[in-house]
Image (cartoon, helix red, strand yellow):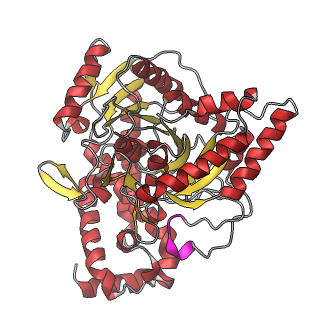
Amino acid sequence: MSETAGAIAEAVRSGRRSALSVAEETVARIRARDGAIGAVTRLLEDRALTEARAVDSIVAAGGDPGPLAGVPYGVKDLFDVAGLPTTAGAAMRRGAAPAGTDAEAVSRMRGAGAVLVATLNMDEFAYGFATVNAAFGTTHNPHDIDRLAGGSSGGSAAAVASGMLPLTLGSDTNGSIRVPAALCGLYGLKPAHGSLPMGGVFPFVDSFDDIGPFAASIADLKLAWRALGGGDGADSVRVARLGGWFEANMAPELAAAIELLDAHLGGLVRVEFPKVDRARSAAFLMTAAEGGARHLPELRRRPLEFDPATRDRLMAGAMLPAPHYLAAQAFRETFRAAVNALFEHYDVLIAPCVGEVAPRIDDPFITVDGARVPARAHLGRLTQPLSFIGLPVIAVPLRRPGKLPLGLQLVGAPGREGALFALAERLEADGLTGFSPPA
Amino acid sequence: MSDAAIIEMARALLDLDVPPDCLPGVRVNLALLAEHARLVGDLDE
């Protein structure tokens, strides 16, 4: 496994290593590895070396640069980076006006001592679960470069899984952190809706958009969560597992792993959310309508400059009659109330993240109820119903050395991310979950 | 929904011209949205 963020920060803070040397090694590593992966869209060498020197100056003066001192990281291409156009993965935005300032999350990372090294690939405008981008290319899964990395934050996941970066930031609207985390065998956090700052983040669906980190260990994920402003603490960790919709369409090896975990935790009660299929459909409608409305001006002006894979979905979404959007929104409150009632009895619910391993790039389909359906739209069928009501979720990788990754979701009540971290730390310590580097 | 109906609806309601290249994809996605709308349920509920 590559060096952890925690180890880098400890070495830089103590003066044993310079942030500059870490940044230089990271730039060289990206140059050597990214050709086969396609995770990085812009290598920010000058900025990285400048930020690293600033960290070293603080250390030399006897100060503390922060908990992420000298830790190299990257951001999905929808975070504002001062001086660069924020492309959101769209060719039409390559010539957009450069951002005047960094996104708030980038400012917080810098305040914690982290060093920004790269911007990272995504599905155009974050609409997809594949990171197959007509303008910026396909991001390949480091565990098998013939397979999808997942999306839409695929570059953020692949950069960590390939060992190029120890930390990255992504965004999650319907599963865009959790899906690539599962397919690339990483930890990924989608916090409770609204809990991390969205300033300077190119929006997709205001009702569901959130940002969060990727990491190869739960300790690194927690470091990033705290640096971004996340809270802590867990009074109790009462665990159950999600049945029904979440147990259908699972690969046998995933089902077996969940049974093993269930037994390890002493036998879990199985609970169900009501009408999950309806929740997923409602999330689908709200996403289409809000995304379509947001991009309508450009769809009118220059439709053929969109990635065809997103354009037709956005056009259809813009045409959705308002009563269907409002019905979806009304159902959301009913669904939220029913789910919140479950959290009176449990702090963490365990569910699969994606039902099978990463699909092949040349055969981008998954199996749902016996039918082959496009991965780009359906990889998030287990994640969408959760972000629909803003729940915090940590995606955790099952420990599977030498095998393609499979992942779980640890689902909590809003504001109780601490319980999720507590369970994730226990599972990793017990050897059930954890990053298994690509063979 | 026919291509002609899609073109007319987009133009009338959204001032949006749907290019011919986009029509097959838009038609498929409208059908998908209709299926999800059916699942979400009765608007009078």
Percent of width and height locating residue A151: 40, 54
- Residue shown at the point (29%, 64%) measured from the top left: B33
Q: Quadrant of residue A83?
A: bottom right
Q: In this rendering, is residue A264 above or below A351?
A: above
- Residue shown at the point (37%, 84%) measured from the top left: B18
Q: In this rendering, is residue B10 above or below A271?
A: below
- Residue lying at the far right of the rendered structure: A61
Q: Is residue A216 left or right of residue A17?
A: left
Does residue A64 belong to the magenta stretch? no
- Residue lying at the far top of the rendered structure: A266
Quadrant in which the C terminus of chain A is drawn: top left
Query: Where does the magenta region start and end?
Result: A88-93
Q: Quadrant of residue B28?
A: bottom left
- Residue shown at the point (24%, 62%) measured from the top left: A362
Percent of width and height locating residue A220: 55, 32
Is residue A409 at all visible to an observer of this figure? yes
| Viewer-closest of A73 and A82 | A73
Q: Is residue A10 left or right of residue A395?
A: right
- Residue shown at the point (44%, 17%) measured from the top left: A237
Is residue A269 at all visible to an observer of this figure? no
Percent of width and height locating residue A157: 45, 47
Q: In this rendering, is residue A243 above or below B44?
A: above
Percent of width and height locating residue A168: 55, 45
Q: Is residue A160 left or right of residue B11?
A: right
| Viewer-closest of B31 and A321 | B31
Q: Total label count?
A: 0
